[in-house]
Image (cartoon, rainbow, N blue to C red):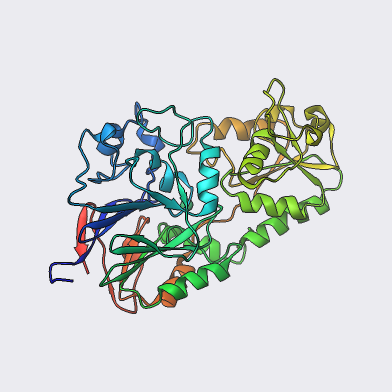
Amino acid sequence: MTLKDKTTITFYNGLTTIGGPMIEVAYNKSHVLFDLGEVYRPELELPDESYSTLIKNQLIGDVPNFYDPLLTGQPIDHQRWEHAAAYMSHLHLDHSKALNFLAPEIPLYASPLTARLLPVLNENGDFLLPAAGHKPNYTRPIIAAKYQVPIHIGEITLTIWPSDHDAYGATGLIITTPNQTLAYTGDIRLHGYHPDWVHQFLAAARGCDALIVEGTGVSWPEEKQVQLSAEFTGPRTEIELTDQIIQLERVNEKRQLTFNTYPTNVERLLRLLELSPRKVVLHAKRAHLLKESLQQDYLYYYLPGEQKIANLNPQLVVDYEKLLADDHEYLWQVVKNYGDLQVGGLYIHSNAEPLGDFDPAYEPFIQTLMDRKIEFKALRCSGHADEKELKQIISEVQPKALIPVHTLHPELEENPFGKRILPKRNQTITL
Ligand SMILES: [Zn+2]
């Protein structure tokens, strides 16, 4: 190590916005990039999602020497950078959507579940951004990293830890260089299924030189009171959420019950499948996702006119008409045709699409349910640590420097154990 060998961190995107962090850690001739998402801003109504449009609108970072030269028109300087790799903390689009933009020769690491689920989610070519020279349904290779086994990228070492977030297979990262140890939380919470995993990851990061922490939970300081108020009856944890669904099944013995969840929150669905008193029936597309990624079979149905999916067991299909007529045997995943549902039923909306009134599909969806006098029950649980949990996360790590990202208010995260750095977009810092 000479004096000029320093660890640098460059922040290309995802700082004062929720999502899309793109951060490069470099040492000498080695460098790594994480994550590979696109910032979600539907209100921009962009004409396309080409590389240049996304760069121009700052939805992805303008990161040199990582993107595919077929997109950028710029060759990668392999002499300057002898060792390169990328990592994705989890499969949410604001962390993964641009993964096909990575140059094909640069290895991309993620958890085994992330590596398995993303190609299935992109089977129809409508999940990820397309790779240059490939069909839209192509997903570039993702290396399924072994948890807690160091990955050497020249002089940089990556260690991937299982963590907890509302994306199945979410992870955190510890990065070591010859002179620094850094940790990156990805998206993180303590009220999910695996707080124990989170605590282990944080313990491994303890005393690190810099903790890059997400701060979604401090983005709306004005809303803080609602969650803390005594009237708040919504679920505070994932466990409470599934318990509340089961409770709704118990008190509604004779009523049509339907639900929907978000596809990437596989674990919530698995828990419901395991614990539900009624038989849970999934739409075929969702059953296919679980089959392809986990090799698990569940009851499923097709909407009228839908094409049969080859890998689903034909013995597990439930007739759609039977579901429409049912009021006691099934809890089933409804994805459209809400007008077919029974009058007076109950629908559980659990962070499903349409996600909220920013989506043009939301209002007509709510209106159809109202027209059918279907009770709309929203049972949500955040994938992100709230303000209190963030404080705990920081206190478990006690970092020498805290670097908040992925938040509207990075200045609201404080570090009682050392300094805090609020980087600007495209800024490089040396610790
Ligand atoms: Zn996420």
Quarter of the image where one finds residue 3: bottom left
Decide which of 236, 130 is in the foreground and name it. Answer: 130
Q: Is residue 32 visible?
A: yes
* Residue 391: quarter of image: bottom left
Residue depicted at x 26% and y 63%: 422
Along the line of sight, the residue nearer the viewer: 133 or 343: 133
Residue drawn at (27%, 38%) of the image: 55
- Please determine whether, in this image, residue 39 is positioned above or below residue 156: above
Task: Give the percent coordinates (x, y) of residue 100.
Answer: 39, 38
Q: Residue furthest left?
A: 3
Of 21 and 409, nearer the camera is: 21
Q: Quick one: quadrant of the C terminus? A: bottom left
* Residue 16 in view, yes or no: no
Q: For this view, does 320 lie left or right of residue 407?
A: right
* Furthest-top residue in this view: 305
Above or below for 286 versus 22 = above
From the viewer's side, name the closer residue of 304 and 161: 161
Task: Give percent across and percent down for residue 255.
Answer: 82, 41
Which quadrant holds residue 42? top left
Query: Residue 374, percent across and down?
Result: 72, 37
The quarter of the picture where the N terminus appears is bottom left
The answer to whether 40 is drawn above or below residue 124 in the figure is below
Q: Height in image: 395 above or below 128?
A: below
Residue 333's spot in the image, x, y percent? 70, 39
